[in-house]
Amino acid sequence: MPTIREQLEQRELMMLVPQAARSAETRGRLRPEAEDDLRPAFQRDRDRIIHCKAFRRLKHKTQVFFAPAGDHYRTRLTHTLEVSQIARTIAKALWLHEDLTEAIALGHDLGHAPFGHHGERVLNELMPGGFNHYEQSLRVVDVLERDGRGLNLTWETRDGIAKHSKGKLGVPVGTDSSDRAATLEGQIVRISDLIAYVNHDIDDATRAGVLQESDLPKTSVRVLGETSSRRIGRMVGDVIFETRRLQLREIRMTGEVLDETLALRQFLFRAVYENEVSTAEFRKAGDILGALWTKVRERPLDFLDHRTVQAEGPDVAARDFLAGMTDRYAVGLFARLFIPKPWVDMHRALEEWTE
Ligand code: MG
């Protein structure tokens, strides 16, 4: 009698297109381990990510707006869930592997620094050799979770996480094969990340009064639609039909929709991400990270993981510590280390940080 997992693997073989990844054909995990009786390999990856600590910390990491007063702004966690929703819609429509797609989507930003992209820029300047969140996401799942043992995910999930972004100037589809995820599921997450943030960042920036819908580039609005909902629908549909037209050789968008999507991203960089007013608080946040970087490296034994300090040096250990912080943890630790005690009321936030 086959196990439930074997039956589900069989169902994948019957249901999914030949171009889909298949759990039973995974290239395997970093360390071999016995298969589960109930869940195929990619489903298990997804579950491990949901249960890990870095995933829960996404709740308190900035997406774009620093410690927003309103409850309706995105956080890194709700961004991740929106990416997952968009990516699964595309995967399902193309008969690709939804669980693998979801695992990559839920894991893609686990290595994100506090204070959004500003935090990433600051860490990039502080860390010899630089810093980027997609490499750190892979380090979280490979090494940092479970007290240094990592989540031991499959090769396909790890590849998708490592290749989900190339930053500000990266193109999400149609890149060289060495630059994109090996699976179509991984490629879906990369374009879904862009679709999600371009649209929800416009929504949040509008909510914050940083821009108005009428400020958006006219051609983009004409091609993509007048509301977030329409634009997401247009982009998602375009990915599905263009990828099908090209017989699933790789995940693609039509030139017209891609150009206007990138135009919106460029507009957001100018109007929001790098706007003087909206980044004013982030400059202070950058100073906080800079001060913490100096302090924890002065006293590595008090703050940093001893094994990492010994094996890879204080810079790597400090990077892991700072990148793992939530916004409020970084602010709380700064207050504890630099501001005389009677002035602060942030100890409780610090105590909530449990190992
Ligand atoms: Mg993302």
Image: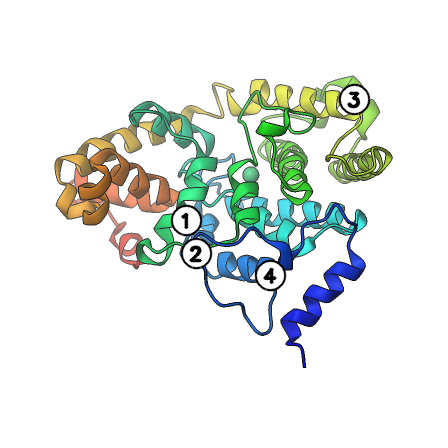
**Number of the label disc, if any, that sits on residue 255:** 3
Front of the two marks 1 and 3 = 1
Local SS, label 4: helix
Question: What numbered label is drawn on residue 274?
Answer: none
Residue drawn at (73%, 34%), measured in percent from left and top?
Answer: 250
Q: Nearer the viewer, residue 242 or 337?
A: 242
Q: CA distance from mark 1 to mark 3?
A: 36 Å
- The residue under label 2 is 151
- Which one is in front in this view, the residue at disc 4 or the one at disc 3? 4
- Report the disc number at residue 43: 4
Q: Earlier in the sequence, mark 4 or mark 1?
A: 4
Q: Nearer the viewer, residue 276 or 171?
A: 171
Give the image location of residue 110, x and y in percent: 46, 46
Mark whose residue sits in front, 2 or 3: 2
Is disc 1 in contact with disc 3, using a CB cutoff of under 8 Å? no
Kind of residue sitting beneath label 4: Gln
Cα–Cα gap, marks 2 and 1: 6 Å
Q: Secondary structure at mark 1?
A: helix
* Three-letter code, disc 1: Asp
- Sequence-wise, which precedes: disc 4 or disc 3? 4
Q: Are marks 2 and 3 in contact (CB under 8 Å)?
A: no
Relative side of 241 to 124, left or right:
right
Q: Residue at x 21, y 48 (%)?
A: 307
